[in-house]
Image (cartoon, helix red, strand yellow):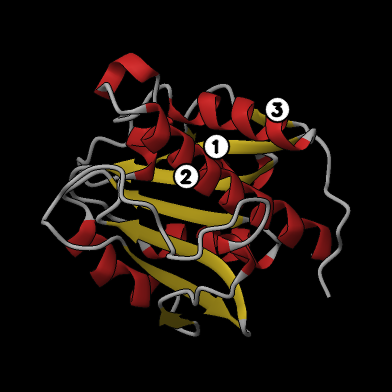
Amino acid sequence: MLSATLVKGQGLGLLKYDGGGDWYANPTALNNLAEYYSSQTGSSVYVFPKEIEVRELLRSGVSFLHVTGHGRIVFNEEQRQTLRDFVRRGGFLHIDDNYGMKDFVLKELPVLFPEATLQPVSLDHPIFKVPFSFEQGLPKIHEHDSEAPQNVGVFWSGELVAIFTYECDLGDGWEDPNVHNDSEEKREKALQMGSNLVHWSLLRLTKS
């Protein structure tokens, strides 16, 4: 049973990864998400002051690790082990395709988490219910390949420890309003869905 009491002052971080992809693609996204989540829930979250390399992750204090970009993403085996240790210790990994990452991530996930079950997250999971309700699942923020928003959840011993979101572009919706000129409704939906992911990461941490 997950605790209803959230850990205070937990960190959100942006991963700087190898491979040449633009990990820095959405520079205003996490700060806006942290501010929105804190204002809506009264919980205290902060953004780690600089990008995080995998070798720094376990001592960073970050519990929600966000990964984005448009291109190639590569991990070596030492980095994979660190990411496994991160989720084992209660961290949550969110990979969000900014368009162009999908093929690389779908190939990497079974290597990164060989013991986990990879499958779409069902609509009755808390990430679609708390604190905001998404009865239809992920919101569509930006158009990529004219497909519905999709996800791959990583379930380790039955628990959701990571998620890959694509065909929705949540991170773009977290950016400052003038970056993409998205409607207020789209930005609100993106920030609400992001808040649900952050909320789940904090619930996981209280359980670990």
CA distance separating discs 2 and 3:
20 Å
Identify residue type, mark 3: Ser
| Residue at the spot 26% in from the left edge and 24% down from the top edge | 180
Of badges 2 and 3, nearer the viewer stands: 3
Q: Which residue is mark 1?
A: 13
- Location of mark 2 (residue): 66
- Circle 3 sits in a helix, a strand or a loop, which is it? helix
Specify whether 57 is left or right of 205: left
List the single residue furthest toward the left. 145
Q: In the rendered view, would you say 31 is above or below 194? A: above
In the structure shown, which secondary structural element does the residue marked by tag 1 occupy?
strand
Question: Looking at the picture, which amino acid does disc 2 mark?
Answer: His
The answer to whether residue 17 is seen in the rendering is no
Indicate which disc, 2 or 3, sits on the residue closer to the N terminus.
3
**Marks 1/2: CA distance?**
6 Å
Q: What residue is at 70 percent from the left and 61 percent from the top?
A: 90
**Which percent across, then down, holds residue 171?**
38, 38
Q: Quadrant of the N terminus?
A: bottom right
Q: Residues within 10 Å of mark 1 (few under 14, many from 20)?
A: many
Say which mark, if any, is on residue 39: 3
Q: Is residue 27 left or right of residue 40?
A: left
